[in-house]
Image (cartoon, helix red, strand yellow):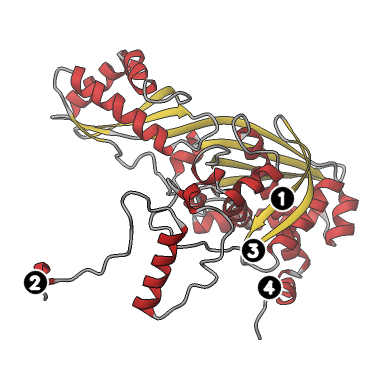
Amino acid sequence: MADQGTVQRVRIPRDREDDYTNDLAAQRRAFAVEQTGTTLEHVGSYSFDPAVTAGNIENFTGVAQVPIGLAGPLRIDGEHAQGDFYVPMATTEGTLVASYNRGMRLLTECGGVKTTVVDEAMQRAPVFILDDAKAAREFGTWVAEHFDDVKKAAEATTSVGRLTYIGQYSIGPLQYFRFNYTTGDAAGQNMTGKATLAACEWIQQNHPSRPGFMLSGNMDTDKKHSGINMLLTRGRRVVAEAVIKRDVIKGLMGVEPAELFRMRQISNAGSFLAGNANNGAHYANGLTALFIATGQDVANVSESHAGVTYAQLLESGDYYWSITLTSLIVATYGGGTGLPTQRECLELLGCYGKGKVYKFAEICAAVVLAGETSLSSAIVHGDWVSSHDQLGRNRP
């Protein structure tokens, strides 16, 4: 094994004073050629000033160009999203845009989708370490009694974040907390991290035992699916629902509502058997395509795709279909939403900037429902595989 002191690390070019320039990006692409022999012609083709990426990327070298397709119109009758929307979807999966487009047509011809944001919370979950279980319990009581002071310390770090409540969970001498916030139009993970650190420091300085803490005890389940988030909400909890007319779905999809309902029972059993994050068909597909197009943190799909499909076969022969996203983490301001192409896609939906995040959340839920109607119908009708064969292959 080589002595670490003799290892020569070849450093990627960077400039500590001004690293976000075309010249530095070109230097890094040349460095990649020198080190690997691979040219980055397409990676180096972009239309914006690298300076706009400060705060979004380090060692900016170029771009990954993901194709964007347009689906719609999708008619939405929500509290915040109202009207017909054309939806940008960034993906490399053939058939995906066509499938969502078909589902949007179905929902629109049936009168559209009703959408409702029913809850909101973003968490940071610190853990304090006490001497024993009794001390941890009494410490939890002390924190609850001083909630107003803790809230004041947390909210001093943010202009929009609001601490709403603190959940408590005891394990041996450990007292786990889930600090729950509203975060305005931001996704809020960084915001809540900063606010919770300030709150924990206030607690540590003012509690008589000066207990130690870790800022995250992993109960916020950041970028990981969890049952607690499905129950208690992380991000926005959003419902999209529609009544699918029997004659419309029979004409467009070639399936009967009764067939879909039978499939729903079978699919629920399979989801239970597998321990799935949701009992639907493919929530993550539409969300990922929307996230890439609009500058969301794509890793949040790991949480955001969790949800519940609920359906009923109505006496009229029509089909009630709903999806509930329990942990949808999205933003319309901050993060990657202000980058040039991502901002354009948000503006296409009328969702860029402050005061738009509930609208965008409702659109996301409606898009997921569109994808569920299309893929489920394709499975029942038997054209799922043939559609992929027709549209999803670009190589022999």
Kindly report the distance in space between the C-alpha atoms of the residues bearing marks 1 and 4: 20 Å
Instruction: Look at the numbered discs 4 and 2 and tell me whether their residues touch, using CB distance below 8 Å.
Output: no
| Residue underneath mark 1 | 87
Badge 1 or badge 2: first in the primary sequence: 2
In the image, which is nearer the foreground, mark 1 or mark 4? 1
* Residue 258: quadrant of the picture: bottom right
Q: Which mark is residue 67?
A: 3
Question: Going by the image, does 227 lie left or right of 361?
Answer: left
In-front residue for pair 24/245 = 24
| Residue underneath mark 2 | 3
Coordinates of residue 92 in the picture (x, y in percent): 61, 66
Instruction: Look at the numbered discs 1 and 4 and tell me whether their residues touch, using CB distance below 8 Å.
Output: no
In the image, which is nearer the foreground, mark 3 or mark 4? 3
Coordinates of residue 145 in the picture (x, y in percent): 31, 13
User: For mark 3, does the 10 Å Cα neighbourhood hold few (<14), some (14 to 19), or many (20 or more) residues?
Assistant: few
Q: SS of the residue at dot 1?
A: strand
Kindly report the distance in space between the C-alpha atoms of the residues bearing marks 1 and 3: 14 Å
Badge 1 or badge 4: first in the primary sequence: 1
Badge 4 or badge 2: first in the primary sequence: 2
Coordinates of residue 26 in the picture (x, y in percent): 44, 66
Identify the amino acid type marked 2.
Asp
In the image, which is nearer the foreground, mark 1 or mark 2? 2
